[in-house]
Structures are given as C-alpha cells and as structure tokens.
Image (cartoon, coloured by chain):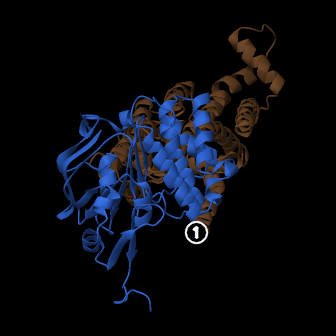
C-alpha cells in the first residue's frame, strides 16, 4: 500500500534520513518511535510531500508520490502536523469543517456537516462546537485539529484505502483523551486504512500499534510487531538510557521501564 | 452565518444610499428626490423639467467622483483582506509590500524629470504618461518583492514583509530627494500623489478603475476556502488540497493591478485595506466567506464618506483624502499592534 524505498534526506550537509525503507499494508497502525532528532517528523514531512527526498522513492498504491499532486492526494490522505498556530480566530466547527474543503466546492453538503459532527463526537469536542478556537486549552485545540484530520477522510470512498499521518497527536492530551485518540486511530486503521503516528510513549505504542518503526539517527533500527522491535538492545541504543523490557501482565505486550535499576531485585 | 449575512446586506444598502447622498453634497445641493429625477432624465426614462446646472454637476463632476471613491475603496479593502489572508497577519496592507510607495515614487520621478517637456495640469499626454509610470511602478515593485521572497517554488512571507518595509523606505527616501529638487508647482503635484485626491475623476478613469476592481472581485470572491485554510498554515492548507501557490500568484497580480490603477488616478490612499477588514473581523468574525464581500462593501462605504469629508470640510479647498484615511487608520493600526503585544 505505502512503499518507502531507500529514501534519504538532508538539510545542507546534515543527513536527517538515510536509506529508510519499509512497506505497510491496509489495516496497519504504525507507531513511529525514536529519540529527539531521529528523523520522525522529517519522515512525516516526506510522506506528506512537504519535502522531496534526495534519493529513493515513495509509492502510494503503486503510484510515485513525486508524480501526484498534494491536491489529488487530499481526498485520500490527511495530515496532522505539530504546533498548529491559527493566524485568525474561527469558531471550532468551522476549523473542523476545513478538513472537508477537498470535498465541496462552495458550500458544505449534508455529508460534510455529518462528517464534522461525527468526528467531533469521536474526539469529544462537540460540546464546544460554537466556541472560538482561540479560547480553547492546548489539549482541546489538539483534539479539534485531530477532528479536522479525521473529518477529511470520514466516509470518503469506502473501497479505497486512505492514509492518515499524525505527528505527535497525543501532545497536551490527558490520559483519557490519549487513550481515546489511540482507540480512534486503531479503529480507523482497521477499516482498511494506513495510519502512521509519531509518538513518544513507548508503552502506549506497544499497547495499540500493530507495528513499530524505530528510528535512530535517520536510519531504521527496527520495523515489525512491538514484541519484535521493543527489545532492550534496540531501545538502549536509540535512547541511550538504561531500559528493561518485561511482559505486560494485562495487555500481553512488551512493558518498557526506563531508569536506573537497583542491582538486587527480589524479596527483601 | 446569519449575523454575517445581516452585516453584508446592511453594508450593501448603506453603500447604495451613500452613493446617492454623497453625490448630493457640495456647493450645489441635490436632494435624493432630485437625484432620482436627474438620473431617470439622463437615461431617457423620465420626460420632465430638470435643472440643467444640477444635471451637469451631477453627471460630469459628482457621479464619476463618487463612483470612483466607491470602486477604489472596494478594491483597496478587498486587496488588504486578501493580503492579510496570504501573509497570515492582520497588519498586511497594500502599502505594506511597497506597491503604493513604488507607484508614488515613479509618479514623482515623472513629475520632476519630465516636467520640462509637458505642462502637467493641462496636457493629456502628460497625464497618460504619469498614469502609466505610476502603474508601472506598482507592477515593478510587486514583481521585485515577489522575486526577492521566492525560494524553491515557495514564498517566504517574512522576507516578503521585510522586503516591503525596505521598498517603502527606499521609495520614501527617493521621494524626499525629489521634493528637494522640485519647484513649487511640481511640489503640489507630488503632494497630490503622495496624499491622494479623487478630484481628477472622469468617466474614463472611472471605467478603468471599475475594470480593475471587478477583476479583483471576480477572482477573490471565489476563493474564501483557500484563505480560510491558510489560517491553519501554508503546509496545512496544502494538506487539505488548497492551491496555495496559485493563490499567491493571483493575489500578487490582482493587488498590483488594483492598487497600481487606483494610485495612478487617485494617488496614495493608505490604511483602507487595514481598517476595514479589522473592524469587520471584530463585528462578524474572520471567516473569509463573509470577510471578502463585506470588506469590499465596507471599503466602498468608508472611502465614499472620506471623500465627501475631504471635499466639503474646507470647501472650496480640499483636504487630501490620504490625510483623512490616515487619521482614521493610524489609531486602528496602533490598536492592532497593542492587541498583538497583549497576546504574546
């Protein structure tokens, strides 16, 4: 579905990404992990055509991204970038409606308004639909922007897979809304779509994602199921920090603990 | 949505009423009833007795002037709104990217260095040359700033704003040198160009200005979605499929056309593109679907009355209209600055 073939990207002489390759299939929720500066956001920018790779190519449904315009992609790809700053203030529901702009010409149709309502319900933002965006808190703004990205792909051509790219969508969210966002992402992927999410909480990634893409200094260290990728060797290499990986007693996925551990662990 | 519709309809009615009232004001007073009679008579739909002096005043002097004020106001305000959407900054205004200053500077150049060949007050040729030079100055300064801020198929908005400030400073310095070189008559002409007046309006100039204004309206009123999306950010607007680069080119060309033509015939009239969208955003919100048409109407209304004040305040002399718009605009400019400071 989404094929990334040996892509490299650099800014001046600094290599940000080097020889990154991976392939994803419909229904996959992929968590992109790595330390600061590992190239996670740059990867999202290449996938959203904000930058062009210096080498390699990206294929979406066997079509080179280089040969497709952002306008064509807008009906099957939505992007949520980090730190969105709105230059003018709008009512919240108008911000979400912007996600539907690729789908109507001048005035929103019934299905556009339905999509706005449905995704605002999903992200728990419907209560402040008429408030001004500027009056919201950081976490509320983040949820509104997530609703906008979801609205863009809501009920658009069921038979065709869509691509959702989320760059740190969990920023500023409280525990409940973090889990809500992850659940939404999971069910979005399960409808035959592809979702890439940059995140920092490794345990949440292990709990919700189908696959993990672990980046270190612009290169892929691991790509596979959480159990395959989240090993002590790989994580300590990436984060340069003491780490232990155990089995999660309830969710049956890896549970990762960071920090310095006392030498003797046992009963008194 | 309802509130914005009410504002637009109110503004439209107010503009039409102002058109009639403002063209009745002056040394020869024409009431609304007489105005209607004169118009119907001129169109041949009414066969009654009319005052031929009033007919001449209305048809030859007042109507082209008032129509010019309405058209110039509409185009300056809608271009201001478009630039603010493009720059994602409420301080952007046609004069800020150097278009007005570039235009006024090239007008001054022609006045001072070509005046030995022409007598400006009377010569039709000189008038045309002056207008072409002014329009050319607007286009050149726009193209310069555009080329300066282009990088890798994208426009760097910060460079564009700062470049505009630099062009304004250069043009102001150049105009300053020219003022130093100019004689008394030239000085008055330069003053006209830098402070603005609608006194030279004829049906020909009104027609040209109408062409430029309607071109801007036709293009810009179709694009509220793109402007709205731009407030998310340039990349974010691209991600929702908006043709951002095409919008930039269109706004630059339309602004050069509208502002160039209005400066050519009316001189520099600043702050209209700043004040009008700002006030309308306060009363009706920032949605460009409302803001673009409302700005056009609001600008028309504002300039119609600014011109009425400029020609009646110290009649028979005139206060330059640019002085009046600056007096109204500068406090609003400072207010926006203050609000932005409070926000950070």
Q: How packed is label 1: few (under 14 Cα within 10 Å), some, or many (20 or more)?
A: few
Give the x, y percent position of residue B121: 49, 38
In the rendered view of the protein, which quadrant contains the C terminus of chain A?
bottom left
In the drawing, does residue A72 fall left or right of residue B25? left
Residue B65, compared with residue A167, is above or below; it is above
Q: Nearer the viewer, residue B298 or B263?
A: B298
Query: Can residue B193 be seen?
Result: no
Kindly indicate which chain is depicted in brown in the rendered structure.
B
Q: Can you tell which quarter of the image residue B69 is in?
A: top right
Q: Nearer the viewer, residue B139 or A44?
A: A44
Total number of numbered discs in the rendering:
1
Dot 1 lies on which element?
A: helix
In the drawing, does residue A219 fall left or right of residue A132? left
Query: Can residue A128 be seen?
Result: yes
In the rendered view of the protein, which quadrant contains the N terminus of chain A?
top left
Q: Which residue appears farthest toward the bottom when viewing the image?
A: A268
Q: Nearer the viewer, residue B255 or A205?
A: A205
Give the x, y percent position of residue B172: 43, 58
Which residue matches tag 1? B341
Give the x, y percent position of residue A126: 66, 48
Give the x, y percent position of residue B168: 42, 57
Residue A259, compared with residue B298, is above or below; it is below
Kindly indicate which chain is depicted in blue in the rendered structure.
A
Q: Nearer the viewer, residue A4 or B46?
A: A4
Look at 61% across and 60% down and name the residue there: B336
Q: Which residue appears farthest toward the front when viewing the image?
A: A267
Which chain does the numbered disc 1 sit on?
B
Look at 57% across and 25% down and name the residue there: B203
């Amino acid at each position: 579905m989404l094929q990334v073939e040996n892509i490299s990207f650099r800014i001046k002489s600094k290599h940000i990404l080097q020889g990154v390759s991976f392939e994803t299939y419909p229904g996959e929720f992929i968590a992109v992990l790595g330390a600061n500066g590992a190239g996670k956001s740059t990867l999202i920018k290449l996938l959203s055509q904000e930058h062009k790779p210096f080498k390699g190519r990206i294929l979406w449904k066997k079509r080179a991204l280089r040969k497709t315009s952002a306008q064509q992609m807008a009906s099957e790809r939505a992007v949520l970038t980090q730190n969105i700053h709105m230059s003018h203030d709008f009512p919240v529901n108008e911000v979400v409606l912007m996600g539907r702009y690729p789908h109507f010409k001048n005035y929103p149709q019934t299905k556009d308004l339905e999509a706005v309502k449905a995704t605002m319900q999903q992200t728990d933002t419907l209560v402040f639909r008429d408030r001004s965006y500027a009056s919201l808190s950081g976490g509320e703004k983040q949820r509104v922007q997530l609703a906008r990205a979801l609205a863009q792909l809501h009920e658009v051509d069921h038979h065709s897979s869509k691509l959702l790219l989320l760059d740190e969508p969990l920023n500023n969210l409280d525990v409940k809304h973090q889990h809500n966002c992850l659940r939404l992402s999971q069910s979005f992927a399960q409808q035959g779509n592809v979702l890439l999410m940059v995140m920092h909480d490794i345990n949440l990634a292990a709990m919700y994602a189908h696959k993990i893409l672990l980046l270190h200094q612009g290169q892929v260290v691991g790509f596979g199921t959480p159990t395959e990728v989240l090993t002590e060797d790989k994580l300590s290499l990436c984060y340069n920090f003491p780490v232990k990986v155990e089995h999660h007693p309830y969710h049956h996925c890896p549970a990762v603990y960071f920090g310095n551990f006392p030498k003797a662990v046992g009963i008194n | 949505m309802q509130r914005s519709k009410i504002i637009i309809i109110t503004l439209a009615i107010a503009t039409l009423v102002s058109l009639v009232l403002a063209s009745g004001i002056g040394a020869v007073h024409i009431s609304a009833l007489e105005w209607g009679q004169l118009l119907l008579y001129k169109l041949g739909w009414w066969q009654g007795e009319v005052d031929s002096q009033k007919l001449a005043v209305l048809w030859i002097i007042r109507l082209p002037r008032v129509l010019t004020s309405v058209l110039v106001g509409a185009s300056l305000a809608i271009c201001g709104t478009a630039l603010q959407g493009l720059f994602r900054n409420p301080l952007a205004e046609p004069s800020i990217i150097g278009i007005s200053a570039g235009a006024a500077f090239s007008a001054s150049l022609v006045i001072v260095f070509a005046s030995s060949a022409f007598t400006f007050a009377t010569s039709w040729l000189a008038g045309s040359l002056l207008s072409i030079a002014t329009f050319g100055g607007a286009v050149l300064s726009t193209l310069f700033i555009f080329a300066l801020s282009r990088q890798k198929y994208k426009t760097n908005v910060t460079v564009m704003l700062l470049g505009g400030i630099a062009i304004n400073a250069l043009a102001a310095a150049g105009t300053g040198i020219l003022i130093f070189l100019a004689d008394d008559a030239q000085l008055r002409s330069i003053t006209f160009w830098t402070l603005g007046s609608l006194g030279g309006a004829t049906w020909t100039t009104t027609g040209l200005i109408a062409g430029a204004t309607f071109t801007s309206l036709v293009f810009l009123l179709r694009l509220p979605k793109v402007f709205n999306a731009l407030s998310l950010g340039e990349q974010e607007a691209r991600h929702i499929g908006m043709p951002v680069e095409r919008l930039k080119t269109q706004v630059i060309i339309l602004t050069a056309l509208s502002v160039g033509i209005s400066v050519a015939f009316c001189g520099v009239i600043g702050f209209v593109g700043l004040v009008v969208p700002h006030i309308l955003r306060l009363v009706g919100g920032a949605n460009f679907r409302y803001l673009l048409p409302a700005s056009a109407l609001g600008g028309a209304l504002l300039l119609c009355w600014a011109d009425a004040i400029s020609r009646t305040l110290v009649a028979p002399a005139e206060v330059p209209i640019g002085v009046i718009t600056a007096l109204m605009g500068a406090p609003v400019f400072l207010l926006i600055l203050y609000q932005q400071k409070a926000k950070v």
